[in-house]
Image (tube, rainbow, N blue to C red):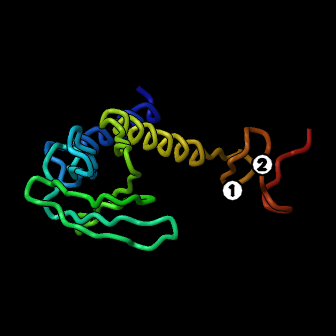
Amino acid sequence: MNKSWRFMLLTAILGVILLHPVRAFAHRLIVLHLEGQENMVQVLYDDGTAASRATISLVGENGDVIWTGSADGNGKVSLPGYSYYKGVADDGLGHRVMFTPGEESQVIPRWVAATGGVAFLLFVAALAKFFSKRSTHPNCPHPSPLPEGEGNCREGEGELPSP
């Protein structure tokens, strides 16, 4: 197995290990509009745990906060009956999500996010490998990223002979 394949295999294995922890300590927030309960939402983390510390702020069309409320122990919040432009749920720990009236939070499945992360790491590794390739020419002491036969020697420093 040549060095480039070993490098890419090692990068892929390391990426999978780092992106697939046994227990994740970071969560995304999800806001669910509860069916059958008008003006009631539930704020959850993506693993289903209730975000009991969350606060919800409703923002009007002019950008001003028109209402703020806190979630109960089950992550539920009873919203006022008047209309709003968008809502913002924040758990105070750095997790925040915006939602609009009547729409659920959009959630990217974990396998899609993990696959995208591994693909990004492999792309960066391939770019690093591509740009790290250097070839030295017999008459030029300087490394060159150019193909064989196209040196980058300066005048008087071992230039390649003319064809």
The picture places residue 53, in percent across and down from the top left corner, at: 15, 64
Q: Tell me the amino acid under the disc marked 2.
A: Gly
- Quadrant placement of the N terminus: top left
- Quadrant placement of the C terminus: top right
Q: Is residue 64 left or right of residue 91?
A: right
User: How far, Cα to Cα, is label 2 from label 1?
Assistant: 8 Å
The picture places residue 91, in percent across and down from the top left corner, at: 23, 64
Residue at 20%, 44% in the rendered image: 37
For residue 151, which numbered disc appears in the image?
A: 2
The picture places residue 59, in percent across and down from the top left corner, at: 41, 66
Q: Residues within 10 Å of mark 1 (few under 14, many from 20)?
A: some
Residue at 23%, 69% in the rendered image: 92
Q: Tell me the amino acid under the disc marked 1.
A: His
For residue 99, which numbered disc appears in the image?
A: none
What secondary structure is marked by label 2? loop
- Nearer-the-camera pick, 6 or 119: 119
Outermost residue toward the top in this view: 1
Outermost residue toward the left in this view: 73
Outermost residue toward the front in this view: 81
Q: Is residue 94 left or right of residue 64?
A: left
Q: Residues within 10 Å of mark 2 (few under 14, many from 20)?
A: many
Q: Which residue is mark 1?
A: 142
